[in-house]
Structures are given as C-alpha cells and as structure tokens.
Amino acid sequence: MMPSSPDLVIRRARTSDIRGIRALVAPLAERRVLVSKEAVTYYEAVQEFRVAELDGVLVGCGALHVMWEDLAEIRTLAVADSMLGTGLGGRLLEVLTDDARELGVRRLFCLTFEVPFFTRHGFAPIEGQAVSAEVYAELLRSYDEGVAEFLDLERVKPNTLGNTRMLRTLE
C-alpha cells in the first residue's frame, strides 16, 4: 500500500530535480520501457513535471504535455523500483489528471507498455487517429517527438515498437 507517511510529497518539479528525474528514468530507458532523452529536454519541460519525494529522495515523476486545445499526453511516468506496487504511480497519474482538468484538457493520451496499469486508470487502447484531419495537419507542424509518436509517424516507429496508444476522456 501507499505509504501514508507525512514525508511523502507530490509537488511541481524544480530545475534542481532534473538529475533525480533522469536517475529514475535511466533504468527504464535501459529496459526500453521509456525513451531516453537529453538533459536539455528535461530542463525545457520542467514545468510539465510533478515529482514524488519521500524523505528527501525522488521516488517518482510524471509529466503532462499539452498537445492541443483538448488533448494532452502523460509522459515519463516513472516510479522507483522500491515503490512499485505501492500505488504511487496511480497517485502521480491522478495529480497529472487534475492538472489537465485545471488547464481545460478533456482527453489524455499515453504511449505505453503498461497497458493494465493505464486501463485501471480509465485509459483504453486506440487505433488510428484521435484527432480531426484539421488538427492532425496542425500537429504535423510540431517539432516535438512525442507529438510525432502520437500521430504515429513512420519516422518514430523505432521508438514506439511494442507500445500501445491509449486515450482517456475526462469527465
């Protein structure tokens, strides 16, 4: 179960957290569960991240990346091995979902190997495009690799092999 310790805090990330975020992501990137990114990418997106801290140590992270007026992606959701099975991943996901609601986002996308986890949290696998042809054309202008993965572009196929594209509509 999730530790009810008052020392567990989920908060917005700060630039000083980037090394810890990269340390959480590194073993998952080695196992090809998450895509490895350059440090600069994390610094550029620091405002998208939430982190979980237990006794002063980062034990989880996740990001919400807005892609369009009603669409955002859950990215880089990672939990330390010592925290697996505690519910921390679900708590981080719900905080990011609350952030999405606050921003006015109605749909959340994720690209994941962790289908059972995301299914438990209201996501469902999708085929094809989740946006209109007009929005698709606009999204093609993005330089963001995650948007390219969302659009299922051929050039990012090596990054997405084996992953499932999932979507959740928020109430």
Image: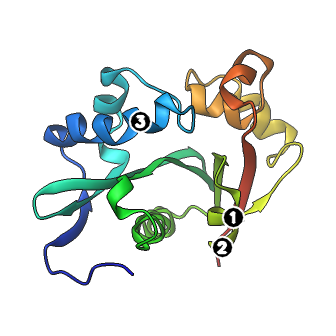
* In the rendered image, the vertical position of residue 148 relative to residue 33, given as above or below: above
Q: Secondary structure at mark 2?
A: helix
Q: CA distance from mark 2 to mark 3?
A: 24 Å
Q: CA distance from mark 1 to mark 3?
A: 21 Å
Please say which color scheme the image uses: rainbow
**In the current view of this chain or complex, which residue is farthest to the top?**
155
> Residue 54, image x and y in percent?
18, 64
User: Mark 2 is on which residue type?
Assistant: Arg
> Residue 157, image x and y in percent?
75, 23
Please indicate whether residue 24 sits to the left or right of residue 152 in the image.
Answer: left
Residue on which the image places disc 1: 116
Is residue 28 something one can see in this rendering?
yes
Q: Residue at x 50, y 67 (%)?
A: 97
Residue on which the image places disc 2: 120
For marks 2 and 3 on the same chain, the one whose residue lies earlier in the sequence: 3
Q: Residue at x 52, y 47 (%)?
A: 66
Dot 3, how many residues are within 10 Å of its Cα: few (below 14), some (14-19), or many (20+)? Answer: some
CB under 8 Å between discs 1 and 3 = no
Q: Secondary structure at mark 3?
A: helix
User: Mark 3 is on which residue type?
Assistant: Pro
> Residue 27, image x and y in percent?
41, 36
Please indicate whether residue 155 sits to the left or right of residue 52 in the image.
Answer: right
Q: Residue at x 55, y 26 (%)?
A: 144
Between circles 1 and 3, the one closer to the viewer is: 3
The label shown at residue 85 is none
User: Mark 1 is on which residue type?
Assistant: Pro
> Residue 165, image x and y in percent?
75, 47
* In the rendered image, the vertical position of residue 45 relative to residue 7, given as above or below: above
Residue on which the image places disc 3: 27
Please indicate whether residue 114 sits to the left or right of residue 157 in the image.
Answer: left
Query: Residue 7 is drawn in which quadrant?
Result: bottom left
